[in-house]
Amino acid sequence: MNKIVGLLIAISSFMAGQQRELSLVECEEAFQSNNLQLLAEQYNINMADADILQAKIWELPQLSGQINAYNPEGNKVFDAGHAKGAQVTQLIYMGGKKKNEIAFAKSNKELAQLQFSQLLVDLRAQLRTAYFNLYYEKLKLDNTNKQLGYMNDLLSAYRVQSAKGNVSLKDEVRLQSLVIQLNNDKLGINKNILEFEQSLKLLTGITEDIEPRISDAEAKDILAAQPFGDDEELKKKALENNADYQYYLKLIENSKLYAQWQKSMNVPDLNVGAGWDQNGGTFKNEVNLMVAIPLPLWRANQGNVEKANYAIQQNQKNADYQKLNLETKVRAAYKTWKTQYDQLAEIKTTDLNNMDLVYDGMMKNFRKGNVNLIEFTDFMDSYRETALQIYDMKNEIIQSAEQLNQLIQTKIFY
């Protein structure tokens, strides 16, 4: 017997160790430290730094030489003692090619940083969404379990009385129907909880199940928070701060830098060097200056220049579309939040308290026989639906607020 008790205690301890109670701030800290997508995206910035470094590197100087292969006068092969030479040349970039290439590489890094910022915002929004979803699903589960506990006991009692013929089978079936509905609610809630727990594990890198830690006061403050400004002010803030929109604006600048770089490729480069010749020149052991430049008979890079100019126009249109898309999303998200906020505000705190008081009163009166079974089950079914709806309404307000935060990407709720 003692062994069985010890085993049960060990299992309970193990299950408790598989769950961690964390605040939202603690989850966000774990997310920024452990999220694999975020860590992988960081390498794009590192690679952009490497591209800047590469853009600054010049072509290596070239060393060439020659020796005599055959001396017809002395009838000698490889007469290196009397005829040899060497040259060193260096490519000199003209037209600001290197400057333009470096500027383009730096612009690519800024694009990589904006992509990282947007990914950070999107993943953090997923984290916060999953966290609040899990919080309200847990509340729904607690409420459902509380109802189930009483209704299962009541159903067991009715089964005994029904078997004895003291109550009708119809009453037992009525209770059974309500218990089945509550169990069905619980099944759906548990399925959602599992999904949200998996999301949080993936986002935070924490392998244990996360138990949200939010006090009632914190939950009320979150629900009561309102955005600073109307939808026009929020649209303005979104255009200033949304990393995805800023990326498209930066892409226009980036394509202009690329076009400038391609134009500079039409400017011929110089090859400058020095050469030494032992006997092949006008003088013995002469040293010569060497200069070479391509003849600019046509623009060798004209096709790439035109392509780059079209890219500027394309990116401008994309930016215009993203602006319209962002403004539309902000307006819709604000209206959605406002509608849900006003809807919940119509349900006063006293109304919610009264619902719980009526629930307790109905339970007591049913036990005393002051309420018949039909009235009791009708009320319980109505209470079950209303309780779930209220939790969903509260959650939807927070989710709408999170969508606004994701779009505007600066503090707007106070």
Image (cartoon, rainbow, N blue to C red):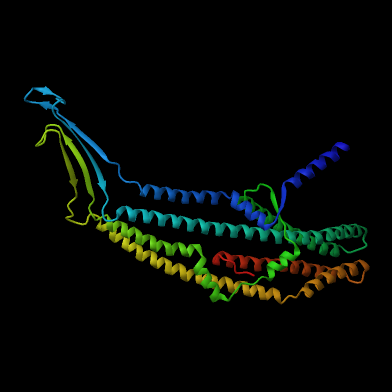
Quadrant in the picture for residue 275: top left
Q: Quadrant of the N terminus?
A: top right
Q: Quadrant of the C terminus?
A: bottom right
Left or right of 99: which side holds 72? left
Q: Residue 80 at what x, y percent from top left?
A: 16, 26
Q: Which residue is nearer to you in this view: 346 or 179?
A: 346
The residue sitting at the top extreme is: 75
Q: Residue 142 at what x, y percent from top left?
A: 77, 59
Left or right of 358: which side holds 59? left
Q: Which residue is nearer to you in this view: 199 or 254?
A: 254
Q: Residue 75 at what x, y percent from top left?
A: 8, 22
Q: Which residue is nearer to you in this view: 156 or 32?
A: 32
Q: At x 76% / y 47%, what residue is drawn?
A: 16
Q: From the viewer's perspective, is residue 14 above or below residue 412?
A: above
Q: At x 93% / y 68%, what residue is drawn?
A: 368
Quadrant in the picture for residue 413: bottom right
Left or right of 256: which side holds 83? left
- Is residue 11 visible in the rendered image? The answer is yes
Q: From the viewer's perspective, is residue 115 above or below residue 2?
A: below
Q: Residue 146 at what x, y percent from top left?
A: 81, 60
Q: Which residue is nearer to you in this view: 196 or 284?
A: 284
